[in-house]
Image: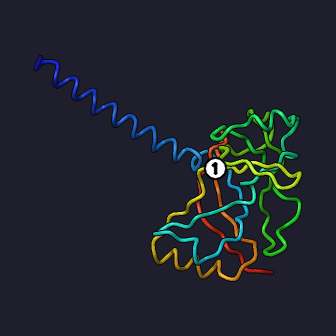
């Protein structure tokens, strides 16, 4: 029995290292092979946007309306369940943002399967919303928290204070739709 213990222990430790390496490579993949896009962040009250050493982010692309799903019937839309993957097509906006003159990216369509053309970001459905006749889904992309040191968090809070839009997140999106948050951008108003 003792002659098998050392090889089994080595195998067990090797598998743990392989899993850790796989997780690391999966998280850094968008930064290596991704395309950089600028996504608009929804205005957030600076007094509640920091918890510890991270900034909680909401994106304008986080709510996808039923009308933005290309070729999807109302019944198919209602069958989308919590946790299901949704592919959101994005494109560079035709006009600069009115608050900052930055060229950001916006929703061009939403799909339940990988779109054949164009840039897209992969999200998961977390909640269904219905207001009057306006049905939509709330999506999370895995880029909703920006971690920073306490000094940097205070600096970001000061920059965001008093702004009514024109705040952005610099995001790298890999060819498979996986996103990685790189930085927050608070351009000077024009």
Q: Considering depth in this image, is 65 or 22 the residue closer to the camera?
A: 65
Picture layout, residue 2 above or below residue 59? above
Crowdedness of circle 1 by 10 Å Cα count: few (<14), some, many (20+)? many
Residue located farthest toward the front when viewing the structure as drawn: 132
Residue located farthest toward the left when viewing the structure as drawn: 2
Picture layout, residue 145 above or below residue 25? below
Q: Considering depth in this image, is 168 or 113 the residue closer to the camera?
A: 113
Q: Considering depth in this image, is 146 or 85 the residue closer to the camera?
A: 85
Q: Which residue is mark 1?
A: 141
Residue 170, percent from left and from top: 65, 61
The reply, left or right, for residue 174 in relation to residue 12 is right
Measuring 68% from the left and 54% from the top, which residue is drawn there?
Answer: 36
The quarter in which the C terminus is drawn is: bottom right
Measuring 12% from the left and 16% from the top, which residue is drawn there?
Answer: 1
Image quarter for residue 45? bottom right
Residue 109, percent from left and from top: 83, 45
């Amino acid at each position: 029995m003792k002659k098998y213990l050392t090889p089994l222990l080595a195998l067990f430790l090797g598998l743990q290292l392989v899993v850790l390496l796989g997780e690391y490579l999966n998280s850094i993949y968008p930064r290596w092979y991704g395309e950089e896009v600028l996504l608009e962040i929804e205005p957030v009250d600076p007094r509640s946007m920091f918890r510890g050493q991270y900034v909680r982010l909401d994106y304008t692309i986080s709510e996808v309306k039923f009308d933005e799903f290309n070729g999807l019937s109302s019944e198919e839309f209602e069958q989308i369940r919590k946790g299901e993957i949704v592919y959101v097509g994005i494109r560079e906006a035709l006009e600069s943002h009115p608050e900052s003159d930055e060229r950001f990216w916006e929703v061009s369509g939403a799909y339940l399967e990988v779109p054949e053309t164009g840039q897209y970001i992969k999200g998961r459905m977390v909640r269904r919303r219905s207001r009057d006749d306006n049905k939509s889904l709330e999506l999370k992309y895995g880029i909703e928290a920006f971690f920073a040191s306490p000094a940097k968090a205070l600096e970001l809070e000061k920059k965001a204070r008093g702004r009514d839009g024109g705040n952005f997140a610099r995001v790298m999106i890999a060819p498979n739709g996986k996103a990685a948050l790189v930085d927050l951008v608070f351009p000077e108003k024009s």
